[in-house]
Amino acid sequence: MNILVCMKQILDPEVPARDFRVDALHKEAERGSANLVTNIFCENALETALQFRERAGDVKITVLSFGAPSAEDSLRKALAMKADAAALVINEGNPHPDPLTVAQVLAAAAKRLGSFDLILVGRESGDWGAGQTGGLLAEELGWPCLSFVDSIESAGGKVRVKRQTESGFEIVEAEPPVVLTITNDEHNVPRIPKVRDVMMAHRQPLTTFNTADLGVDVSSRYYEVAQLSIPQKESHCEFVPGDTLDQKVDALARRLLEVTAAL
């Protein structure tokens, strides 16, 4: 069985609020305000694929990313986690393409890379959080899609998946090919690669494409960010006067009545 796992590199969403900056002109978070990391849900997807291979046996896992050249770091980490092969489609245009564009690029790259039985993507990205790429990718390929999956089992030529719902869990059997969007669970926390595997990962070949190689037009967009800014919130503090506790309580009560009457 061949599995393709799609990865995305993003600004670290754990950056302290005081260090986060927005580039209002380009309508994006400032590069350099945080480290670049692999989207956690993409790592959950890779871990789910790795665990499936450990149980099922004869499974090849390829990782794919569409992004800046720096996305190679995410792919190298995936190789260190024991993915078998990696490919990068270099994004030479808009640094934040919409989910439909991403889906079109990933679909074209998947077809170029070979034949896959399962394609796993994170349920959403940690930067924009649209959560649309998996469903749009399935539509581009003409495949079915199952969302919010947290584990996969082999079921005699089919796959049995457990997916999260608002009221609990569902167990669904699907016949490949199928796209799965993976969510986080205590059982698919990404493993930490060994130092030796990290070193070996940098020696492995990396397939690279650009959008022209794939014949995909990335100039069109089906939505546009009109404005991006950090909300400004003002707060005021007043010290309650009084020399004794009773005086302070009375002053606080009077002030609360004044504020209430003004509303």
Image (cartoon, rainbow, N blue to C red):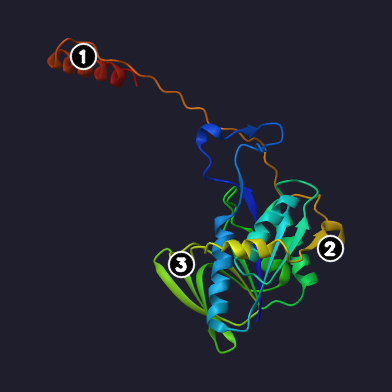
Circle 3 Cα neighbour tier, 10 Å, few/some/many (<14 / 14–19 / ≥20): some
Q: Is residue 135 among what the camera can see? A: no
Q: Residue at x 82, y 60 (%)?
A: 209
77 relative position to 211: left or right: left
Query: Is disc 1 placed on a helix, strand or loop?
Result: helix
Which x, y percent locates residue 196? 61, 64
Q: Residue at x 55, y 59 (%)?
A: 41
Task: Identify the amino acid type marked 2.
Answer: Leu
The residue positioned 23% from the left and 11% from the top of the image is 241
Residue 243 circle label: none
Percent across and percent down for residue 18 are 52, 32
Q: Is residue 207 left or right of residue 181?
A: right
Mark closest to the chain's N terminus, 2 or 1? 2
Determine the secondary structure under disc 2: helix
- Give the image quarter of residue 56: bottom right
Label drawn at residue 164: 3
Residue 263 image position (x, y, % from top left): 34, 22
Decide if residue 118 is on the left or right side of residue 217.
left
Front tag of 3 and 2: 2
- The residue identified by callout 2 is 214
Name the residue type under label 3: Gln
As measured in the structure, the alpha-carbon distance from the residue carrying label 1 to the one carrying label 3 is 53 Å
Residue 220 appears anywhere in the view: yes
The local crowd at label 2, few if under 14, some if 14 to 19, many if 20 or more residues have their Cα within 10 Å, is some
Residue 74 place in picture, x, y as percent: 65, 57
Against 224, residue 159 (above or below) is: below
Query: Which residue is disc 1 drawn over?
Result: 251
Q: Nearer the viewer, mark 2 or mark 1?
A: 2
Q: Residue furthest front?
A: 196
3D distance between C-alphas at marks 3 and 2: 35 Å
